[in-house]
Image: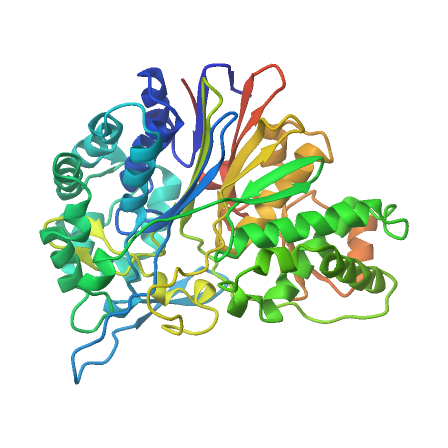
């Protein structure tokens, strides 16, 4: 286990983590390090995140109010020219055991708000000049980063999307040959774009010539217009805060659903552990039932209500939670069964960065480009997102959300505070609808099972899909598996740990100020020390 008392970055690629740690060593704080790390990830993890995507940043300063920056995609309000229909092209992806269809093209592009979020967070919290914070990402784009096996495999997997246009294919298959492990991913146009934005300011991307180029790339078969680009790109929210598991969990609030569903399942787990009727049940069984209850919420229509005022308070109030405890208790007694399906995304094009600096400021940042739309803005190096074509974040149907509203995401950058109000665990995950279970399982392994952060991140996981329960090796005992099968679960054992089960990158903070890193090998995790 890697430890430090001077600062730490844990991310999905060693180059991403190193860029953030270098910024900490240069005197920057956790927000400066986050900007350096995530802009580097555009080339280190090129099909998971990008300058045309979106994300969330949770900033937790010591002894100050925490803040959640929402830079996720919004539904455009643009109107198409007469006679043109939306371009939402199906792109089947073969995962070996199943084929899943994603949707790309001009009508798949939501507002590309990630860079606006980074600039806003730097304005409010940054310590070093912005040009210094952007320098590692600019260098990575200009000089390239060598692809590891995992990132090369993502490029191979998503070839049906990445070869949709000549400009997109040119990024991922220079000279017509797809990049493979050991090759350098370079994006010199993106380097020029980042350099231009560092000098001219972020308004160029949302109001200037670059904004017009982005809109033109989505015209005439898309929805994104200049009014959407000129609109506020970043929502600043108080994080969802909940006393649970012996401390306080800070996470992504509505209108995103991931944080609320984690909080809901964690609250149920707390109550089930304290309930005389269920306290003796093995924790993996209670965990599974708590995760299933969250899936049942989505099936019952929670997604349609994520923009309702007060939805978090309603879902986390005592009567609602007690009703769910009673429901689970009845299931454990064999009284009732029912399905709890929800939209699936086997790829989960998301990555996460956790940072703590020497002063104790914590940053948890999750970002995504979806699978990408297949559209690269000419001369910019910006591969635009396909958030409007992602079934799992458009559960009401494609283009059903009113213009201007933020899409509801599963991304849930989180920080767990101890009883003294100090950051104890900083974490988040990639993995689409699997990420909330991955985050909760790491929290419970640490806080209920007493594992170190590294043990908790490396521990085997499970994931529920309807009545199916996917489990990694050695997660369940024979007795626990038998009990779950009696509850109606159909067990699908995996032969090895997999990227499918999320990618939690986490930092544990001891009472003595020591930082311990937990990098998820499922998604190429790496730890870097300041």
Instruction: Give the camera-side residue of 130 and 384.
Output: 130
Q: How many marks?
A: 0
Residue 201, quarter of picture: top left
Q: How is colour applied across the structure in the image?
A: rainbow
Task: Determine the residue located farthest toward the right in the rendered image.
Answer: 276
Residue 307 in the image, given as x and y percentages of width and height: 48, 63
Q: Residue at x 85, y 49 (%)?
A: 275
Residue 232 in the image, given as x and y percentages of width and height: 29, 53
* Position of residue 369 in the picture relative to residue 499 (left or right): left
Instruction: Give the camera-side residue of 136 and 212.
Output: 212
* Position of residue 232 in the picture relative to residue 209 (left or right): right
Vertical relation: 292 (above or below) 282: below
Residue 330 in the image, given as x and y percentages of width and height: 84, 64
Residue 45 in the image, given as x and y percentages of width and height: 33, 41
Q: Residue at x 48, y 56 (%)?
A: 256
Instruction: Give the camera-side residue of 519 and 335.
Output: 335
Visible residue check, residue 177:
no
Vertical relation: 479 (above or below) 255: above
Visible residue check, residue 514:
yes
Q: Quadrant of the C terminus?
A: top left
Instruction: Give the camera-side residue of 286 and 323.
Output: 323
Q: Quadrant of the N terminus?
A: top right
Vertical relation: 241 (above or below) 8: below
Q: Residue at x 34, y 60 (%)?
A: 74
Q: Residue at x 63, y 18 (%)?
A: 511
């Amino acid at each position: 286990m890697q430890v430090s008392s001077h600062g730490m970055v844990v991310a999905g690629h060693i180059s991403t983590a190193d860029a953030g740690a270098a910024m900490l060593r240069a005197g920057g704080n956790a927000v400066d390090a986050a900007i350096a790390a995530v802009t580097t990830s555009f080339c280190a993890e090129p099909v998971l995140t990008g300058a045309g995507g979106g994300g969330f940043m949770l900033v937790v300063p010591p002894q100050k109010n925490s803040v959640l920056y929402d830079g996720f995609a919004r539904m455009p309000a643009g109107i198409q020219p007469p006679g043109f229909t939306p371009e939402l092209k199906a792109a089947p992806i073969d995962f070996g055991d199943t084929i899943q269809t994603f949707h790309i093209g001009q009508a798949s592009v939501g507002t590309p708000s990630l860079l606006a979020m980074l600039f806003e967070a730097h304005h409010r919290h940054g310590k070093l000049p912005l040009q210094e914070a952007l320098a590692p990402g600019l260098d990575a784009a200009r000089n390239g980063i060598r692809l590891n096996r995992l990132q090369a495999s993502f490029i191979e997997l998503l070839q049906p999307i990445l070869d949709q246009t000549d400009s997109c294919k040119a990024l991922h298959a220079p000279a017509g040959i797809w990049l493979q492990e050991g090759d350098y991913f370079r994006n010199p146009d993106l380097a020029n774009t980042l350099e231009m934005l560092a000098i001219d300011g972020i308004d160029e991307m949302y109001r200037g010539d670059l904004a017009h180029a982005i809109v033109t790339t989505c015209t005439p078969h898309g929805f994104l217009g200049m009014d959407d680009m000129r609109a506020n790109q970043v929502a600043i929210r108080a994080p969802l805060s909940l006393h649970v598991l012996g401390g306080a969990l800070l996470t992504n609030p509505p209108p995103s659903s991931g944080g609320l569903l984690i909080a809901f399942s964690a609250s149920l787990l707390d109550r089930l552990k304290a309930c005389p009727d269920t306290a003796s049940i093995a924790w993996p069984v209670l965990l599974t039932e708590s995760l299933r209850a969250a899936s049942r919420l989505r099936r019952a229509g929670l997604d349609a209500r994520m923009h309702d005022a007060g939805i978090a308070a309603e879902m986390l109030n005592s009567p609602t939670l007690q009703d769910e405890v009673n429901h689970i208790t009845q299931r454990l007694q064999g009284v009732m069964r029912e399905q709890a399906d929800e939209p699936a995304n086997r790829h989960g094009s998301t990555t996460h960065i956790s940072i703590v600096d020497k002063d104790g400021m914590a940053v948890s940042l999750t970002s995504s480009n979806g699978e990408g739309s297949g559209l690269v803005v000419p001369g910019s190096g910006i591969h635009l997102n396909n958030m409007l074509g992602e079934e799992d974040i458009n559960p009401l149907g494609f283009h059903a959300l009113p213009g201007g509203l933020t899409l509801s995401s599963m991304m849930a950058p989180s920080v767990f505070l101890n009883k003294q109000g100090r950051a104890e665990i900083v974490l988040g995950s990639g993995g689409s609808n699997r990420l909330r279970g991955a985050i909760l399982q790491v929290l419970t392994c640490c806080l209920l099972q007493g594992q170190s952060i590294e043990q908790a991140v490396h521990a085997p996981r499970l994931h529920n899909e309807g009545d199916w329960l996917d489990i990694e090796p050695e997660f369940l005992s024979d007795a626990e598996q038998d009990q779950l099968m009696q509850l109606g679960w159909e067990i699908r054992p995996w032969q090895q740990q997999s990227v499918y089960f999320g990618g939690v990158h986490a930092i544990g903070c001891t009472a003595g100020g020591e930082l311990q890193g937990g990098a998820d090998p499922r998604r190429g995790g790496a730890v870097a020390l300041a």
